[in-house]
Image (tube, rainbow, N blue to C red):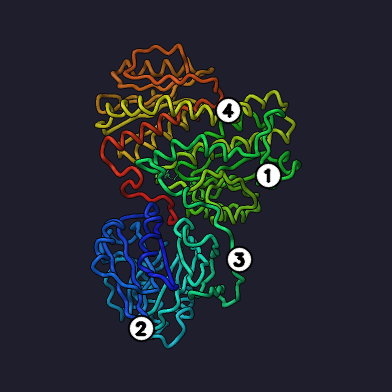
């Protein structure tokens, strides 16, 4: 949720801290701060409400050539966005940045009554707790940190420095990601590997329950019980180019437009067209294990959930006797849901760090159920804790609104379903149509994006002033409508909700009036006529309807219709979703909103 950076080395710490925070700003961005120490331990602390650009303005008057420091960009959980609540928090000699939630901070705060707290945050309480064990440097900083963490409940990714020792940074994690970059004569810290790019490709991913003492030439990792941990240095797979805008105005448009290429990466080596088959190695399930699967649980939040729901409609079509249950992680983690033994759980997450999804993974593993990750972020916590998995390989997704990950997650899960069907002996001629369409998708996506980018930009102009929208679809177009509504609401702030077409007359039809417009997905197929009559129901009540269809025959007098000409029929909703993505982007743009960093949100929700 928040961005954490740290530096100790021979170069200017402020430079890395600011550039690193800029890379992480998409993770959370309502306030920010950095602190550096000079060789004598003299601190320079600069914090601000607002964005990194505001921090840079303040730093211009506080330039230092210090060689050690920590920084933070915040998405507020406890206490409003403000300079006082911004991190780093200082208590005594120590400074702390924190990502996560200290759930017992109130009782800890009571026990720390000697401290005069300045902020409303749980993080400042943790800083005070550490200070209470540090006693002005009487004990090593790492010992004080460990003592404090043993008393805390909740999640944290923290970096701590002390004026008493301006050569070391102590970091620790439980539930919030932290990665250590190993450089030459410098060591860097970040909550996401993308902040390290351009400085080092060598990374150590800290695990939950580990604490590291870092200097410019060393990384010493232990568990909270002081057991030594050998540092495993891994190669960061992301490239610097992958996290630039490449000439696009926004990451969101770049990520929408690069879906042909990103989906190709998802499919690479996994589709055997001539055999009409797919081949997913990652899940690591044997043929016999695949054959035994009777029940799939698909777990995710937001877009990941929508991708799972879309995939579930397809999996039911071709995987015999397999029931598919798609659940919202934040709900499922607290249900007493029974999962039959012959189940497999798909854990879907672009970032691989979503707290609710990670919590579900851990609960499901306790029941002895095989967990398969459908994840994008290489080396992320979920990716490392599942039993097996399929990386979707779409490259870094920076914009808060997820687009390319949705397309690839849905297709990856459809391929997982095909893998089960293949193992169960489903005849190739039943599966081949799906495999063929999957293999053609990247090219068809390119055609749709090229043809409709401009028309949708114009279309959005006509609807940007509405306050409400209804998204509609049946069958596989329904989860797609849900995803379209999520896109619009999260970046244009228009109150957009999706309903199954068949549900309209059970209530939502009452909403239809001039305050609303309707965005209806009407794919060809056996339910096409029903969807057409649903559109007529809306028109009869004066609805302002946009229809997206792949039918040449559609001719109802709706306000606008987008006709996709393509031989993709089974997976047509994947193409229709592109229109909804572009529509959301251009609507938010037309409203002059911050497309990549919408208000109140963050890219990776690592707190529950
Ligand atoms: C989607 O556009 C949102 N940014 C959000 O719903 C997101 O999909 C959700 O938070 C899940 O994130 P994850 O895929 O990284 O777990």
Is label 2's Cβ within 8 Å of ligand 1?
A: no
Q: Locate residue 468, reporting x and y percent.
A: 29, 32
- Vertical placement of residue 385 versus 500, above or below: below
Quadrant for residue 99, please give it: bottom left
Residue visible at 61% across and 33% down in the picture: 315
Q: State the mark number for residue 97.
A: none
Which residue lies under the disc numbered 2?
40
Looking at the image, which is closer to me, 335 or 321? 321
Residue visible at 41% across and 73% down in the picture: 160
Q: Locate residue 581, reporting x and y percent.
A: 41, 34
SS at mark 1 in the image: loop
SS at mark 2 in the image: loop
Which residue lies under the disc numbered 1?
281
SS at mark 3 in the image: loop
Mark 4 vs mark 2: which is more N-terminal? 2
Mark 3 vs mark 4: which is more N-terminal? 3
Marks 3 and 4, how far apart at CA: 40 Å
Which residue lies under the disc numbered 3?
232
Q: Nearer the viewer, mark 2 or mark 3?
A: 2
Q: Is residue 284 left or right of residue 521?
A: right
Quadrant for residue 131, please give it: bottom left
Marks 2 and 3, how far apart at CA: 32 Å
Q: State the mark number for residue 440.
A: 4
Q: Are marks 4 and 2 in contact (CB under 8 Å)?
A: no
Looking at the image, which is closer to me, 132 or 244? 244
Marks 4 and 2, how far apart at CA: 63 Å
Visible residue check, residue 147:
yes
Q: Locate residue 409, reporting x and y percent.
A: 54, 40
């Amino acid at each position: 949720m928040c961005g954490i950076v740290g530096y100790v080395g021979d170069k200017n710490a402020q430079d890395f801290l600011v550039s690193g925070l800029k890379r992480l700003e998409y993770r959370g961005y309502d306030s920010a701060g950095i602190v550096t120490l000079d060789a004598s331990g003299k601190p320079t602390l600069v914090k601000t409400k607002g964005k990194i650009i505001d921090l840079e303005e303040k730093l211009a008057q506080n330039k230092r050539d210090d060689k050690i420091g920590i920084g933070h960009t915040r998405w507020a959980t406890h206490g409003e966005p403000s300079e006082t609540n911004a991190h780093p928090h200082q208590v005594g000699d120590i400074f702390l940045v924190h990502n996560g939630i200290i759930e017992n901070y109130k009782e800890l705060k009571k026990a720390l009554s000697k401290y005069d707290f300045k902020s409303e945050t749980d993080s400042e309480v943790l800083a005070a707790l550490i200070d209470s064990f540090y006693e002005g440097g009487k004990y090593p900083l790492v010992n004080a940190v460990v003592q404090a963490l043993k008393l805390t409940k909740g999640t944290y990714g923290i970096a701590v420095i002390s004026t008493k020792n301006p050569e070391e940074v102590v970091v620790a994690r439980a539930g919030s990601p932290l990665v250590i970059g190993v450089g030459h004569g410098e060591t860097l810290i970040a909550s996401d590997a993308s902040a390290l790019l351009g400085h080092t490709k060598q990374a150590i991913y800290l695990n939950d329950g580990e604490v590291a003492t870092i200097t410019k030439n060393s990384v010493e990792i232990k568990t909270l019980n002081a057991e030594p941990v050998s540092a495993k240095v891994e190669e960061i797979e992301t490239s610097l180019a992958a996290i630039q805008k490449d000439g696009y105005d926004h990451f969101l448009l770049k990520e929408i437009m690069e879906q042909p290429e990103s989906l190709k990466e998802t499919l690479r080596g996994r589709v055997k067209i001539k055999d009409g088959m797919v081949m997913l190695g990652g899940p690591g399930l044997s043929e016999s294990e695949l054959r035994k699967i009777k029940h799939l649980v698909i777990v995710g939040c937001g877009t990941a959930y929508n991708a799972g729901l879309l995939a579930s409609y397809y999996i039911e079509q071709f995987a015999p006797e397999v029931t598919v249950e798609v659940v919202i992680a934040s709900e499922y983690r607290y249900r007493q849901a029974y999962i039959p033994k012959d189940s497999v759980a798909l854990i879907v997450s672009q970032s691989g760090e979503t707290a609710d999804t990670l919590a579900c993974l851990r609960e499901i593993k306790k029941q002895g159920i095989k967990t398969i990750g459908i994840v994008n972020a290489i080396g992320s916590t979920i990716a490392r804790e599942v039993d097996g998995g399929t990386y979707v390989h779409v490259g870094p997704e920076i914009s808060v609104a997820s687009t390319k990950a949705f397309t690839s997650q849905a297709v990856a899960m459809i391929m997982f379903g095909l893998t089960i069907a293949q193992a169960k002996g489903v005849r190739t001629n039943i599966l081949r149509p799906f495999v063929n369409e999957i293999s053609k998708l990247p090219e068809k996506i390119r055609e749709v994006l090229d043809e409709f980018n401009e028309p949708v930009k114009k279309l959005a102009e006509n609807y940007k002033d509405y306050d409400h929208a209804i998204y509609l679809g049946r069958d596989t177009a329904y989860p797609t409508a849900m995803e379209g509504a999520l896109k619009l609401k999260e970046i244009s702030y228009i109150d957009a909700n999706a309903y199954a077409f068949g549900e309209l007359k059970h209530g939502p039809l009452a909403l239809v009036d001039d305050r609303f417009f309707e965005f209806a997905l009407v794919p060809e197929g056996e339910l096409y006529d029903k969807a057409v009559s649903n559109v007529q129901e809306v028109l009869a009540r004066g609805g302002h309807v946009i229809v997206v269809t792949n039918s040449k025959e559609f001719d109802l007098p709706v306000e606008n219709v987008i006709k996709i000409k393509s031989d993709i029929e089974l997976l047509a909703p994947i193409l229709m979703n592109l229109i909804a993505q572009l529509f959301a982007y251009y609507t938010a743009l037309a409203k002059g909103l911050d497309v990549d960093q919408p208000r109140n949100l963050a890219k990776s929700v690592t707190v529950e």
